[in-house]
Amino acid sequence: PTTRNFDFTISEIQGYPDGVLRSLYVINGQYPGPLIRVNRGDRVLVNVTNNLSVPMTFHWHGLYQNGTNWMDGTAGITQCPIPAGRSFLYNFTVEMQYGTYWYHSHYKTQYMDGLFGPLIIHAPEEAQFRSMYDHDQVVLLNDYYHNMSSTYVDAYLAPGNENNEPVPDNGLIQGMNYFDCSSLDPSDGYTCYANSTRAQFNVQQNQRYRFRLVNAGGFGMFQFAVDNHTLSVIEADSTMVEPLNVNRLDIAVAERYSVILNANQSAENYWIRATLDTYCFTTSNPVLDSAGIKGILSYTNNASDPVSGISAEWPGEDPNVLCVDLNTTLLVPADVQQAPKADLFFSLQFSFAIRENALDRAYINGTTWFQSDVPTLNTVVPALRAGNATFNQTGVASGYGLSNQYILDLPDYAVVDVLVTNYDDSSHPFHLHGHQFWVMASSASQYFDYSTYDSLNTTNPLRRDTIIVDSYGWTLIRFVNDNPGMWAFHCHIAWHLEAGLLMQFQSRNDIMKDWTLPDDVQGLCNI
Ligand code: C2O
């Protein structure tokens, strides 16, 4: 296979993506991180040199890592984080998948400080979609704070703050957005440069653009729209779908969509709008609401603001429809798959409560996750090798003596249904590592009706790796337990991960029992 080499040097700098000076973690001096673009079948080598004063990792969001679970980058689960001042070589082969992905640190809330970037895998099957667009472009969205994420954590976890996630100060498109320096309180002591700019996308009339949208933020859901243009959705996470036209779509943290924009309007400039859904924020942010998170779609090759009148209203505005017209249940995978019959059914219930250390933490079936000093993989593999009899493959939860780990040990090749029920008052984007799952059903009302279980649609349901579980609602996913390793399943909101909203699946003991973890991976723990 072709080998693709990347050198990532991680450092802390003072930067000002939106004009406000703050500390940032950057990759090769860049914010956000560089695009990784490879072909399916390639071997990918990413040599990471951690010049920070804190540990870090990289997780390759959506990649299966089949046979290389220890390259999944999940601190406390598949590796010890890379210590300050050390290097580590991520080394894996990209197989069986293609599409739009991203990568990010999987250590605490750290990716919000700049350790993230897009990742695209190409494959020959793309040819059948290439006739639909002329240009291919990543559009990276992230919510944004003016301080290091770690400075918000203690206050957020303090008792009674469950609904007080830190409110973003801005949102960025391609790592930039306008910010009005005069909106800052001078007594807060920020340095603000009044030259912040909006992202500009130059288009040529009657050309078609594939925008690969990635929500690489830590908290907020974006509504994405382009004034006067319809968007045709062709990909959800890395699943290609039959084209579906929408005016705007919601994109939750860690989700990806590809949309095709046909530049068929008059040759003006138009707003690209990436509005943060603020209904879940405790307090609204008037600064955000007025200036907005906007980019410029430019037919004129210049950054002049769209002429008012062309774009005063959002396209397709219907005050009776809540903000969005993408109904994801209408997305039909282009590559048709039947969901097989399930062998096992698990019910996960989660909520927030004040218990451990008198903090307000998240609990899945009664367990709140703390990052383990010993990665669970490093505990499970030797135990399997030793023939530990407690591994009975019935899907029983176990923590293997590690505290605060909720682990379901799955039978080899089982088809597994997981019903996730949300007892919290906000919606949560859950991500499963190492797999795509079928979205079998979901609802915004509290209880799954078991009498409907035998009549679930199994004909080509949407497959993806990140899914919203609505407030006081539920989502039922199905996947095949075919990929060896320890796989995190968690809410992708960085604050909630820090609050412990994570559990793990233990998969393919038949393979894991013969594993020897590579020396360089194990070595990260012996420092
Ligand atoms: Cu995008 Cu657990 O990760």
Image: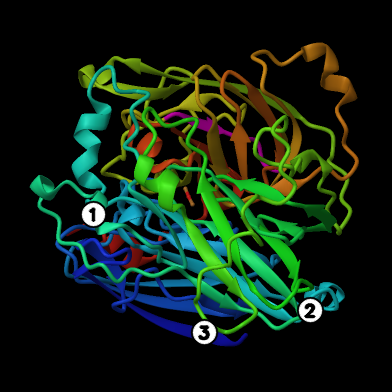
**Disc number for residue 182:** 1
Q: Earlier in the sequence, mark 1 or mark 3?
A: 3
SS of the residue under disc 3: strand
Residue range corresponding to the magenta coloring: 406-413
Q: Earlier in the sequence, mark 2 or mark 1?
A: 2
Say if mark 1 contacts mark 3, CB within 8 Å: no
Given the image, on which type of amino acid does mark 2 rest?
Answer: Pro
Give the residue at x 28% y 17%: 160
Give the residue at x 67% y 16%: 445
Q: CA distance from mark 2 to mark 3?
A: 18 Å
SS of the residue under disc 2: helix
Q: Earlier in the sequence, mark 2 or mark 3?
A: 3
Q: Please identify, in this view, whether the residue under mark 1 or under mark 3 is nearer the observer.
A: 1
Q: CA distance from mark 2 to mark 1?
A: 51 Å
Q: Which residue is the site of mark 2?
A: 124
SS of the residue under disc 1: helix
Q: Which residue is the site of mark 3?
A: 4
Q: Residues within 10 Å of mark 1 (few under 14, many from 20)?
A: few
Residue 149 vs residue 239: left or right?
left
> Whole-percent x and y of residue 171?
42, 54
Q: CA distance from mark 1 to mark 3?
A: 45 Å
> Whole-percent x and y of residue 519?
33, 66
Residue 247 counted in the magenta span: no
Q: What secondary structure characterizes most of the magenta part?
A: loop
> Whole-percent x and y of residue 124?
78, 79
